[in-house]
Amino acid sequence: MNHNKPNHILSCTDLAVGYKDKTVLSDLTLGFAPGQFVSLLGPNGAGKTTLLRTFSRHLKPIAGAIKVMGRPIGEITAMDLARYMAVVLTEKISPPLFSVFEFVALGRYPHTDFLGQMDQADHRAVEKALAAVNAGNLVHRSFSDLSDGERQKALVARALAQEPQLLLLDEPTLHLDLKHRMEVMSILRNLCHSHGITVVASLHDVDVAAKVSDRVALIKDGGVSAWGMPETVLSGPVVADLYDFNDARFSSRLGGIEFRGTGSKGRIFVLAGAGTGALVYRMLIKRGFAVSTGILCSNDVDYYVARCLGADCMTQTSMTWVNSETLAEAGKKLDACELVIDCGFDNGHGPISQGNQKLLEMALKKGKRVMSLRSNGIEKTDPDLPATDGPIICRDAAELLEAIDHRAWVHHEQKQTFNPSPTAA
Ligand SMILES: Nc1ncnc2c1ncn2[C@@H]1O[C@H](COP(=O)(O)OP(=O)(O)OP(=O)(O)O)[C@@H](O)[C@H]1O
């Protein structure tokens, strides 16, 4: 291998990692390319920290080989390794009486002389590192007075002051609020893109990892169960299996996790489409209802949300008309529901819209209780539809929710508008 231009900044072959009497992970063969953001994902205790500590030479491998810049890690001097690789682990450190500048300057040790004297270039490197993590304003602050988010930025700045080509981080967003989590993640991603640094980080937010990572390694049951681009590796079933959960589902298309419910409060049929249903599905499932929905186009965002939430979902491709069998099947599903919610889908001329309009009118004809978010009322195309079968019109999701909470459809007869209480949100 050419040592000047390695394909991989860090690689391992047949690696086994762990402790004296315990092998935690084995048979690991991985390679991390320059400028890649690599996330290590897996449940608590899977071995992410152990792997990072082995990569950073805090732990000896049990078996196999690790190479940094194409060189066996054991042959690299501590000073050279510090020039290639910087590490941010989770240990809480409280250096007494250091300013943030002094703390970050500790990262210059591979570059200063043997007395640790800093020259102008070192000062500039510290300032650059602080600027890279948006922490220039902290330079004169005492390190021990920093908040968790500020401290994390200072830790990353210290690592950057080493001017490494590889940055290893253990749970870099631990204890951080949403703003700082997003800030730290975008700083790390920018380091990959703008500075060509390879970042290898253990993460717990699978949705964030899916969005920032070039590669993910899924770690479970003593090994890497999957490795590759998040777009190909992270599917709903794979993520559910990784973390052993049944009551939630990850969707790579939606880029997040949907929480499933018990469905114990009864079943509601939701007429939706083109994104009108997503919020309503979540609202109902959160409140313990089971949802049947349709008819949805197979590339509709409502379809992805509904499936992810575990709703009973009728679908078909957009180019086809809704045939009588499908309508009859949807009608049976309507019959099994105690309430129908019309989310105000576009009832224009599209084949699915027209099918859903028929379904809505079928619900009214059958005397089903219908709540509608269509503020102008439901336009009836069927002249046979009795005028008295009016739906409860709700102006927004809050009114809909209040009507559902009060089970307004049980008492409602022919009112056209649901009147919320004055306290309604
Ligand atoms: N010093 C140690 N000696 C022996 N076993 C250890 C030691 N440190 C960790 N372990 C064990 O090694 C296994 C892997 O732990 P590790 O901390 O690497 O997991 P992790 O994936 O980082 O977990 P988490 O997400 O909870 O941080 C666990 O079973 C843990 O109890």
Image (spheres, rainbow, N blue to C red):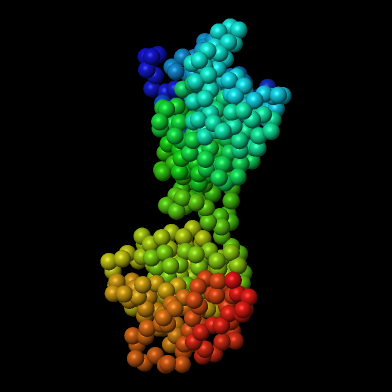
Most extreme residue toward the right is 96
Q: Is residue 246 above or below residue 327?
A: above
Location of the C terminus by quadrant is bottom right
Hey, which quadrant is residue 342 in on the image? bottom left
Location of the N terminus by quadrant is top left
Closer to the camera in the image, 388 or 153: 153
Q: Is residue 215 left or right of residue 113?
A: left
Q: Is residue 294 left or right of residue 266?
A: left
At x 43%, y 77%, the residue is 374
Query: What is the total number of numbered labels drawn onto the structure image?
Result: 0
Q: Is residue 57 above or below residue 237?
A: above
Q: Position of residue 279 (x, y in %)?
A: 50, 64
Most extreme residue toward the top is 114
Q: Is residue 274 above or below residue 205?
A: below
The answer to whether residue 309 is visible is yes
At x 60%, y 7%, the residue is 115
Q: Position of residue 235 (x, y in %)?
A: 46, 48
Q: Is residue 175 left or right of residue 71?
A: right
Closer to the camera in the image, 383 or 265: 383
Hey, which quadrant is residue 43 in on the image? top right
Q: Position of residue 345 (x, y in %)?
A: 39, 72
The answer to whether residue 325 is visible is no
At x 51%, y 84%, the residue is 417
At x 55%, y 17%, the residue is 108
Closer to the camera in the image, 6 or 129: 129
Q: Is residue 18 above or below residue 401?
A: above
Q: Is residue 276 left or right of residue 310?
A: left
Hey, which quadrant is residue 259 in on the image? bottom right
Q: Position of residue 405 (x, y in %)?
A: 61, 75
